[in-house]
Amino acid sequence: MDELRIGQLTKEMVVEELRLLGDPCVAAALVVRRTLFAALKDSPVDGTAHARVVSDSVEGAMTALLLADHSLARGAILVLEAVHDVAGECHLDPTECMRAALSALASLRRFVEPARIDDIRLGIEAHYMGAGEVFSEFLKSSFIPVPR
């Protein structure tokens, strides 16, 4: 059986939601919330698998926002809120889930000009104490550790 490609699925779902809803960043966060909840509720405890699902979902949503040229900074904050909420609802480690999400956000640096990445960083710093520093570390690293 083919491996589930959660990033591709999330991207396609976000693109469809963007067509239907008014605020694309809210739509992206809503799709991430739904995707993560469906994938992670009642799943066995496996931090690496959970981190991969979070990372793939966040990357898919943010790629869709990038392709549609929407606010990455606003989208990042709303997506992080969704990740944090689902981690609590599914009784997962919120720190590990947020690290996976921040890693996925940092992977955008390959496709986005530095000014937009800095806007994302500033938004993260303003909303999540300490997360901006973690995001910055992921940006500085030559390899972004996304569990596979």
Image (cartoon, rainbow, N blue to C red):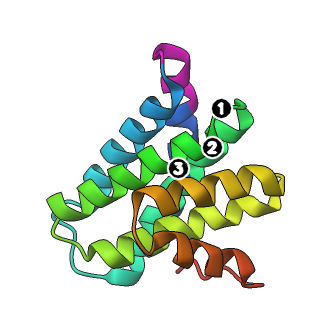
Question: Which amino acid type is shown beneath numbered disc 1?
Answer: His
Q: Residue at 53% across / 42% down in the picture?
A: 75
User: Residue 102 location, x and y as percent?
Assistant: 52, 67
Residue 66 placement, left or right of 39: right
Q: Residue at 74% across / 49% down in the picture?
A: 116
Q: Which residue is mark 1?
A: 70
Q: Quick one: SS at disc 1?
A: loop
Q: Which residue is mark 2?
A: 72
Q: Which numbered disc flags the more N-terminal residue, 1 or 3?
A: 1
Q: Is residue 57 magenta?
A: no
Viewer-closest of 13 and 4: 13
User: Residue 73 location, x and y as percent?
Assistant: 59, 46
Q: Which mark is residue 118?
A: none
Q: CA distance from mark 2 to mark 3?
A: 6 Å
Question: Which amino acid type is shown beneath numbered disc 2?
Answer: Leu
Range of residues picked out in magenta: 15-22
Q: Which residue is mark 3?
A: 76
Q: Is residue 109 depicted above or below 36 in this figure? A: below
Q: Residue at 66% across / 51% down in the picture?
A: 119
Q: Is residue 20 magenta?
A: yes
Q: CA distance from mark 1 to mark 3?
A: 11 Å
Q: Quadrant of the C terminus?
A: bottom right
Q: Quick one: SS at disc 3?
A: helix
Q: Quick one: SS at disc 2?
A: helix
